[in-house]
Amino acid sequence: MPNLDSAQHFTKVAGFGLAVIDVLMATESIVLEEKNPISRQAIQIGGVIPTALATLTRLGIPTELHTIVGKDTLGDEIATILKHERVALDNVIENPDIETPFACVIVNKYSGARTIFYSTGSFSTLTNTEYAATLRPDSRFLLVDGHNPMLTHAFIEKAHAQNIRVLLDMGNPKPGIEALACESDAIIVPHVYWKTISPDSPEKMIKDYLSKGPTLVVATMEEKGCMVGTGETIFHKPSYKVTAADTNGTGDVFFGAFTYGLIRNWSLEKTAAFSCAAAARSCAIFGKEDKLPHSEAEVNEFIKTHTTTG
């Protein structure tokens, strides 16, 4: 674990968002309506919020997940994995009336690119906004994903009432996400999102969002790294050269690593470099058991031994 001072050591990051089980498989190709052999497989946690929180716990930051899963085998598996990762689950709700979401992730064994078949189940339609009252005031950050806009809004309101900073990963375009972006203190805008609204200029997209509410906007750019913007500066940080083995979850690791840099009160330049390194390292590893970093030192060693993409 990193050597944090006492104030940082007891910092807790809470998260509210979709939790799924990934069935991960590597194959040479996908032929529809045929049997497709696979060369590797894994069962793992899925969803940007659970994965980001697990990344943070491995880096030494206490975390707590707020989510709703089914009272079923997949829900039990989520609990087993996250207990192993030491993510607090006291406020996870098991609802017997819903099914736990599930994703089938097919990774190209040659390029690391992934194809995902998934369901969010009933998560996005749940309406019990009183659930946000479970967010305790001892958290410093709240991470959200917007898969349930109504409950996410309630959690953001509760967080701001308790002076908790809200970070939103916008993921893929989805209903209500733009309004949530305006309510958040910081937003991560993946390439898959910003290319739909500003394909030629992530800088223009960053400036636009900064005018709407967030004080920090980060555009992830896949192998090109990221672009970070505030009211004072916008800069690009390159990624690191690796041979991709499994790109699934790379953005989730980036989100957790970026939050870690904010907790450590690092400069945004250092935070961006660390996050790009953690994401690049994860991209070169199959499966989340090993792709999540185990320590700050592990990421720093990766930085020392790898060159940037320019």
Image: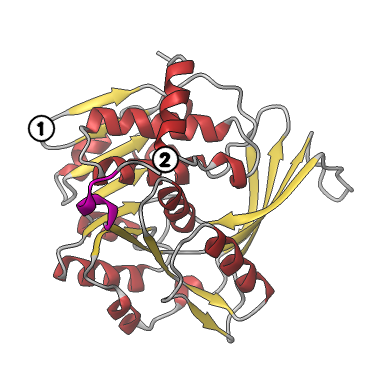
Q: Earlier in the sequence, mark 2 or mark 1?
A: 1
Horizontal side of residue 36 vs 113, given as left or right: right
Q: Which residue is mark 1?
A: 232
Q: Nearer the viewer, residue 147 or 309?
A: 309
Is residue 286 at least partly visible in the picture?
Answer: yes
Identify the image quadrant of residue 284. Answer: top right
Is residue 221 at least partly visible in the picture?
Answer: no
Local packing at callout 1 (Cα closer than 10 Å; few below 14, some 14-19, many 20+) is: few
| Residue at figure coordinates x 48%, y 17% from the top left | 305
Residue extent of the magenta highlight: 4-10
* Circle 1: residue type: Glu
SS state under label 1: loop
Which of discs 2 and 1 lies nearer the camera? The answer is 2
Horizontal side of residue 249 vs 204, given as left or right: right
Q: Quadrant of the C terminus?
A: top left
Residue 133 at x, y percent in the picture: 28, 80
Q: Does the magenta segment cover residue 272? A: no
| Residue at figure coordinates x 68%, y 74% from the top left | 73
